[in-house]
Image (tube, helix red, strand yellow):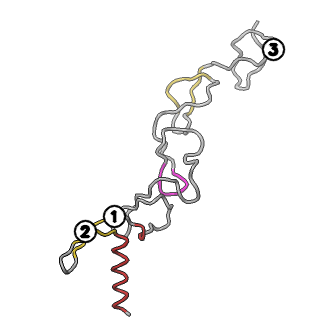
Amino acid sequence: EQCSVPRECGHPADHYCHEDGPCPPCVTLVQKMCLGGHKVMPFKTPCHQPAVSCGEVCGKPLPCGVHNCTRVCHGGPCAPEATGESCGDPCWKMMQCGHVCTQPCHGKTPCPMEKCTVQFSVECKCGTVHKVMCAEYRKAVQDSKQEYAD
């Protein structure tokens, strides 16, 4: 005789009566939304299976307000390791000096140009070539301008 215990999902029981223990999981095939809520999956899955990934890139905005999630379709938060305005990814924004910011994400706050680590060569008036970091060079130029202004 078929089990008469009603299922939470509302599907009819597809197993025989049992005296003890819970009913087996519902195996009725249904269409489901993917974990990330991107689309309804084109194939049917067993009702009891909690979720399915569509395999696409998530793409949802991260808490920093600058980057998007690059993980494959998933459930739960996109960046559980994110703290405050940082998502943990490199910034990659263009700084005022013209170089790309490689610092950890700092949200929508301006890029810290004093931390630009790009190196380039500078030739002195005497002809000597020096390798300098952008931030150091910018500070030296700023200091020399200040010196002449005083």
Tell me which residue sits at (37%, 83%) in the image. Answer: 143
Q: Are marks 3 and 2 in contact (CB under 8 Å)?
A: no
Query: Against 6, is 123 above or below?
Result: below
Q: Which amino acid does label 3 sit on?
A: Asp
Residue identifier under label 2: 121
Residue identifier under label 1: 118
Q: Is mark 2 on a helix, strand or loop?
A: strand
Q: Which amino acid does label 1 sit on?
A: Val
Q: What residue type is labelled 2?
A: Ser
Query: Against 103, is 22 above or below?
Result: above
Quick one: 12 or 147, which is closer to the camera? 147
Bounds of the magenta segment: 61-68
Position of the C terminus by quadrant = bottom left
Quick one: 143 or 102, which is closer to the camera? 143
Q: What element carries label 3?
A: loop
In the rendered image, residue 64 lying in the magenta stretch gets the answer yes
Tell me which residue sits at (58%, 47%) in the image. Answer: 80
Most frequent secondary structure within the magenta stretch: loop
Tell me which residue sits at (40%, 58%) in the image. Answer: 92
Q: Label 1: how many residues lie within 10 Å, few (<14), some (14-19) or many (20+)?
A: few
Residue located farthest toward the bottom when viewing the structure as drawn: 150
